[in-house]
Amino acid sequence: QQPVQSPQAVILREGEDAVINCSSSKALYSVHWYRQKHGEAPVFLMILLKGGEQKGHDKISASFNEKKQQSSLYLTASQLSYSGTYFCGTERFGYGQNFVFGPGTRLSVLP
Amino acid sequence: KAGVTQTPRYLIKTRGQQVTLSCSPISGHRSVSWYQQTPGQGLQFLFEYFSETQRNKGNFPGRFSGRQFSNSRSEMNVSTLELGDSALYLCASSSNTSGPLRGTDTQYFGPGTRLTVL
């Protein structure tokens, strides 16, 4: 029941773009995205609640396709500070009591 | 506001021992959740407490237990430690007050307690 994230890891040069995907085999109510830097706590990025919803903050945005049961995180013109592991957390319909997190995507941005 | 704090930050124990971890949520937050993070399993939900009551529980054995105090501080206890319990234990607080933690609720994570079982 753990959502699937792809890719598992990605290496970028500063200024390049990246897409991280999160998909589930079950119907989803919401998707959360977090970023965790090595040795630090996960930091909340955004919540997506409705099918087709898109959100963005600075150059990081995300979409949530309810029908496809998947969400994508878009990192545009990546910066060195974007490096870390990105997790999606999913909440299923009728299971609004806790979240299931994906295994994470390790993103490395090189100068 | 101060963030979520966890103590201790690092612990080394041996098999069979028990351990207690502590978490202080953001001031005003009454919901505290605990997660286990391992390289192989990722972030796994342990349980959530609200107003001193356990609201939800993940799929962990009874050796894992918790409690919450009237000031919202929470403790997690693991008894009869096993090698596989080595992990980073994270707690997260939320301002949710209306029921079980939902997708609309943002969770703020603490830095975690790194537990090593030898």
Image (cartoon, coloured by chain):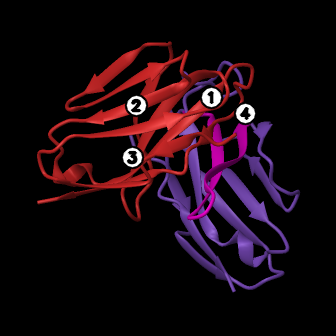
The answer to whether mark 3 and mark 1 are in CB contact below 8 A is no
Q: Residue at x 46, y 28 (%)?
A: A71
Quarter where residue A56 is shown: top left
Q: Is residue A76 left or right of residue B22?
A: left
Q: Which mark is residue B71?
A: none
Q: Residues within 10 Å of mark 4 (few under 14, many from 20)?
A: some
Comparing labels 3 and 4, the label whose residue is closer to the camera: 3
Q: Which residue is denoted by mark 2 in the rendering?
A: A72
- Mark 2 vs mark 3, CA separation in Å: 14 Å
Q: Secondary structure at mark 3?
A: strand
Question: In the picture, which chain is red?
Answer: A
The image shows residue A76 at horizontal and vertical percentages of 19, 36
Asked whether the viewer can see residue A82, the reply is yes
Q: Which mark is residue A35?
A: 3
Type of amino acid at the residue the image marks with label 2: Ser
- Mark 1 vs mark 2, CA separation in Å: 15 Å
Q: Which residue is denoted by mark 4 in the rendering?
A: B51
A55 and B90: which is toward the camera: A55
